[in-house]
Amino acid sequence: MPDHTNTIRGLFIPLVFVALWSTGFIGAKYGLPAAEPFTFLSIRMLITVAILALIIPFFQVHWPRRVKDYIHLGVVGILIHGIYLGGVFSAIHRGVDSGLSAVIVGLQPIATVMLSAVWIKEHVSATKVGGMILGFAGILVVISDRGIGVSGIDMVGLVFCVMSLFAIAIGTIYQKRFCTQYDLLPGICIQYVATAGFVLILAFTFETREVIWSQRFFMALAWLVLVLSIGAVLLLMWLIRHGEAGKIASLFYLVPPFVAVEAWFLFDERVSLVALGGIALCVCGVAIVMNAPEKART
C-alpha cells in the first residue's frame, strides 16, 4: 500500500507552501490602493512582531545572546523583508503587474548563484550558466512584449523589481554565511523588528502615511500577516523539521506561474502567448539552475 504520509510530506505540503507564498504578490496589489507601500509594510511588520511575541513563549526556542547575532539577523531582515518587500510593493504601487513582478523576483535562485560565484567564489557549471541565460532571456521576452513607458511597464517600477531581486539574493547568501545557527522563530522575529524600524523610517521620510481603513485593506493586511508572515513561516518550520526544506527551494520556480493564474483570475491581468513563452523560459532557466549537479569534490 502507498505511504500516504510520505506523499503529503513530499509533495502536497511543499506545494501548499509555494501556493501561499505566491499570494503575497496578490495581497500586495489588493491592499496597496488603501496605503502607500512603506506605510502598509510598517503596519504589517508591527502587527507580525506583536503576534510572534505572543506565540514564541509556547515554543522551546532560544534567543541569540550576542549583539553581533542581532546585527546579522537585522541585516538579513532589512535585505529580505525591508528592501525585497519594499521594492515589490513599490513596483506594484506604481502599476507593475503582480505577475510581472513575480517573474522578475522569481529569478532569485539565478541571481543568488551568480552573486555566490562572485562573492564567495562558488563553482558555476556550464549547465548553470545556460540556465541563467535562459532565465534572463525569458525576462527580456516578457518585458519586450509589454514595452516600457506610457502604456507599457513603468521604468521606475521595473528598477524596484530588480532591486528586490538582488536584495533577496544578497540576503539569502548573507543568511547562509552568518545566520544558519539560530532558532527560526526568534530569528524571524528579530528580522521583522529590524524591518519594522527600516520601513517606518522610509514611511515617515517619503510618504504621507495616510491609510484608507477599508474592508479591502483589512482583508489584505490580515492575509499578509496571518497567512504569509506567520502561517507560511510556521509551515516552513514544519517542513524543515521533517527534512523537506530542500524540496522547497526546487519548487520556488513555480511561484510565477501561480501568480500569473491568480492575477488573471482576480485582477484580469491578461498574459499574451508571447509573455507566457517568456514565463516558461524563466521557469525552465531557474529549474535548470536549481537542479544542475554540483561540482564533484576531490
Image (cartoon, rainbow, N blue to C red):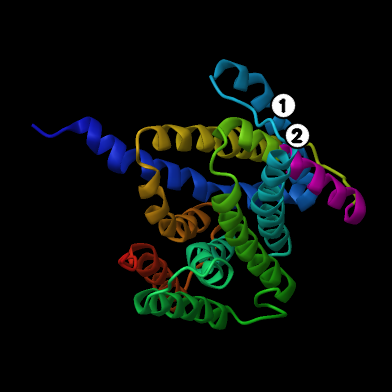
Identify the residue shown where x is 55% and y is 83%. 144
Q: 148 or 49: nearer the eye?
A: 49
Could you tell whether 143 is left or right of 9 in the image? Answer: right
State which quarter of the image contains the N terminus: top left
Q: Relative to residue 121, is residue 71 depicted above or below?
A: above
Identify the residue shown where x is 53% and y is 36%. 233
- Disc 2 packing (10 Å; few <14; some 14–19; many ≥20): some
Could you tell whether 140 is left or right of 193 in the image? Answer: left
Identify the residue shown where x is 73% and y is 59%. 90
Q: Which mark is residue 46?
A: 2
Q: Are marks 2 and 1 in contact (CB under 8 Å)?
A: yes
The kind of residue tagged 1 is: Ala
Q: Relative to residue 230, is residue 171 depicted above or below?
A: below
User: Could one spot residue 285 in this view of the protein?
Assistant: yes
Residue most extreme to the front: 298
Among the 4 quarters of the image, the one containing residue 195: top right
Where does residue 127 sit, x and y in percent of width and height?
35, 76
- Label 2 to label 1: alpha-carbon separation: 6 Å
Span colored in magenta: 193-207
Q: In what element is the residue under mark 1?
A: helix
User: Could one spot residue 26 in this view of the protein?
Assistant: no
State which quarter of the image contains the C terminus: bottom left
The kind of residue tagged 2 is: Leu
Q: Which mark is residue 32?
A: none
Could you tell whether 113 is left or right of 200 in the image? Answer: left
Could you tell whether 38 is left or right of 112 in the image? Answer: right
Residue most extreme to the left: 1
Q: In what element is the residue under mark 2?
A: helix
Q: Relative to residue 258, is residue 209 depicted above or below?
A: above
